[in-house]
Image (cartoon, coloured by chain):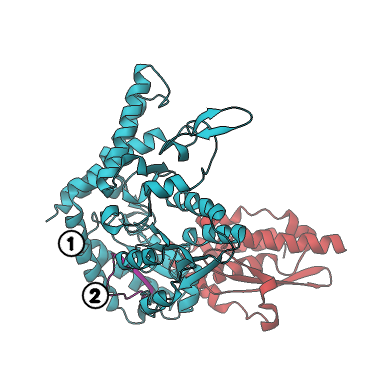
Chain colours: A red, B cyan
Amino acid sequence: MTIKEIQEEIIDDFSMFDDWMQRYEYIIELGKSLPLIDPQYQVEENLIKGCQSQVWLHADLQGESIVFTANSDAILTKGIIAILIRVFSGQKAEDILNADMSFIDEIGLKEHLSPTRANGLVSMIKQIKMYALAYQAKQ
Amino acid sequence: MLDIKAIRQDFPILTQTVNGKPLVYFDNAATAQKPRVVEEAIVKYYETINANIHRGVHTLSQLATDAYEEARKKVQTHMNAKHDYEVLFTAGTTFGINLVASGFGSLLKAGDEVLISAMEHHSNIVPWQFACERSGATLKVIPMNQNGELIMEEFDKLLTPNTKVVAVTHISNALGTINPIKEIIEKAHKVGAAVLIDGAQATPHIKPDVQDLDCDFYVFSGHKVCGPTGTGVLYGKEEWLNKLPPYQGGGEMIKTVTFEKTTYACLPHKFEAGTPNIAGGIVLGVALDYLNEVGFDNIAAYEHELLEYGTKRLSEIEGLKIIGTAKEKTSVISFNLEGIHPYDVGVIVDKLGVAVRTGHHCTQPIMDFFGIPGTIRASFSFYNTKEEIDVLVEAVKKAQMMLA
């Protein structure tokens, strides 16, 4: 599936919820079900350190696509990573770099784009795109 | 006794809803809300007497100067400083500490020691690290115990004739601990050290008497005492302010300037270069008037009631651990829920209208000491109520249920 198609699927998933609590409960569930990161990748150099919670993000090139694995010490942050991984993992560098992120707004998570929660989303997206850029340069 | 209902009506922001819920504002240790008199005074200043101060001969400049200097006198009276020129207006606590530490950066030398405590805000750590790097002096730290109290026997041991500065916080922002600063000041003076007290967290609750304390410097922020952001006060004893070199160069702070040599203005102007935050200074005076009218004894008594009630109610939650259990505490409750990251709790309770602070509160060494990534901090002010604490407790329970 393309990034756009996955994003539409996620928008669909979130449209079932009537209020913030159901949305957050779903994100918490996603956080809990995020596959464990290989411990060897949960290291300082993969850490996106922020004020509020810590995120470890690892990228691996498999063929033409980039596979992401991640973890966080906060469950909501982990849920948000799970969404990002669903969108970006297994995609080509070029597609990741060109991806439009407006779906975040549509699933009601815009508030996580504010600077104090920067570690939640903005820095994760930035880091994902940095990896894509690095792999694209290598190719 | 305080008429809380009437007091709440003085604060327009408190009637707001957040995320569809009535606002419960428990982030008072970060910044206090502003009473209407403060808001009105800002507008009134700009509408009636706005002008640059100290140099103009025209009427508005005279009026603005008078109002600014009158505010300085208000602060002097509030803190019981000996002279009004010992009261410097600053941009806030951080600015005040940097001013003093930077000055000591040129007075200290290798072999000298600066003593801070384990519960300092980063603002009372980093400027002293700068000063030590510049001068070759050594930074030492008074340790604390598991309750979040300073270990005074260790302080006694650390104090030596090499100690030149002791810089400690009056009240811990992350733990609420009230430190025995009078004892600290007295002991530090015995070895000839200068003492700076960080009063950022204390001044919303306690009226400091700098002559009684006998501290050499006392700093606080205007925005935490219901005044505007970007305002603050550095009290310094005259002899120390004369010893310290100027911090910033510019207008206002000079006596004579030639290209070869500049001589500095007398106190307080030596440390107030450039056009100050005139409206801010004047309105800070208004904010202190407001708090004094409410009465600091009343504030302390009522906030203690809130602290006891909040501690009791929060302790009822299973798996909740309070960080900072000093005997002498102000109305700050830092806590964690077992197995749950503080950030997650902060996000959920915000959705329920409750504003708390989560994270390390700019005190990473404290978090390292307790081995935690951060805490959830609820800090109460005199305009808060027990009913609001009930809302917090329910919100925390809800968050716990969702996140467990």
- Residue B68 included in the magenta stretch of the image: no
- Compared to residue B114, the image places residue B315 above or below, namely below
- The residue to which callout 2 is attached is B312
- Residue B325 included in the magenta stretch of the image: yes
User: Quarter of the image holding residue A137?
Assistant: bottom right
Q: Secondary structure at mark 1?
A: helix
Q: Residue at x 30, y 64 (%)?
A: B182
The answer to whether the residues at label 1 and label 2 have Cβ atoms under 8 Å apart is: no
Query: Hey, what amino acid is under mark 1?
Result: Ala
Residue B156 at x, y = what percent?
39, 75
Query: Front-most of B54 and B237?
Result: B237
Query: Front-most of B354 and B136?
Result: B136
Residue B43 at x, y = what percent?
33, 31
- Residue B67 appears in the figure: yes
Query: Hey, what amino acid is under mark 2?
Result: Lys
Q: Chain of mark 1?
A: B
Q: Residue at x 76, y 58 (%)?
A: A95
- The magenta span reads B322-335
Residue B80 at x, y = what percent?
26, 48
- The residue to which callout 1 is attached is B301
- Compared to residue A121, the image places residue B100 above or below, namely above
Query: Front-most of B241 and B198?
Result: B241
The residue positioned farthest toward the right in the image shown: A139
